[in-house]
Image (cartoon, rainbow, N blue to C red):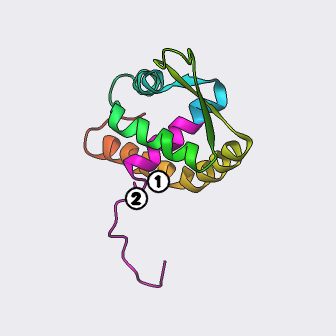
Amino acid sequence: MYKNERKRQFPTTISTTSFVKLYILHLLTEKNYYGNKIKDEVERRLDGKWCPSPGMIYPLLRQLEEEGYVESWWEEPNKRTIRRYKITDSGINHYKIIKLQNKSSFEDSLSIINNVLKDIYKINL
């Protein structure tokens, strides 16, 4: 930030797509998943307050696979009904980088939300 520069952008600068990509890689560090299970798991972990659409999950999984961050296979190759995904070593390294890059945005957002709840709504967390 330059001297006397105003902070005009609200600090939640992480895009929805970047957030979902981060969460996909996070989940895949724990175990293998298929696309709809990733969607359901994100929704569960966010207490049902938000859920990514399949139209966001599947293109991101394809992109992550093209970039070498995940690998996929058909659970039953003859039926081609469930495609499972796992993170690669390269994906783990990429996850660590984007996790660090986004941490301060989440911390800044949390601080602002806590202060708004305290100041406006008189809720102390």
Residues shaded magenta: 1-25
Above or below, 57 against 33 in this view is below
Residue farthest front in this picture: 78
Residue 88 lies in quadrant: top right
Q: Residues within 10 Å of mark 1 (few under 14, many from 20)?
A: some
- Which mark is on residue 57? none
Whether residue 67 is situated above or below residue 123 in the rendered picture = below
Q: List x then y, in percent, for residue 11.
A: 40, 58
The quarter holding residue 58 reads top left
Mark 2 Cα shell of 10 Å, populated few (<14), some (14-19), many (≥20): some
**Left-right relation of 10 to 101:** left
Q: Is the magenta stretch mostly helix, strand or loop?
A: loop
Comparing 77 with 106, the one in front is: 77
Quick check: marks 1 and 2 in contact, CB under 8 Å?
Answer: yes
- Res 52 seen here: no
Q: Mark 1 falls on what kind of element?
A: helix
> Outermost residue, right direction?
89
Please state which of residues 103 and 21 is positioned toward the viewer in this rendering. Answer: 21
Q: Which residue is drawn at 48% across and 83% down?
A: 2
Q: Distance between the residues labelled 1 and 2?
A: 6 Å
Which numbered disc flags the more N-terminal residue, 1 or 2? 2
Residue 1 seen by the camera: yes
Hey, what amino acid is under mark 2?
Pro
Of all residues, the one furthest to the left in this rendering is 120
**Mark 2 lies on residue:** 11
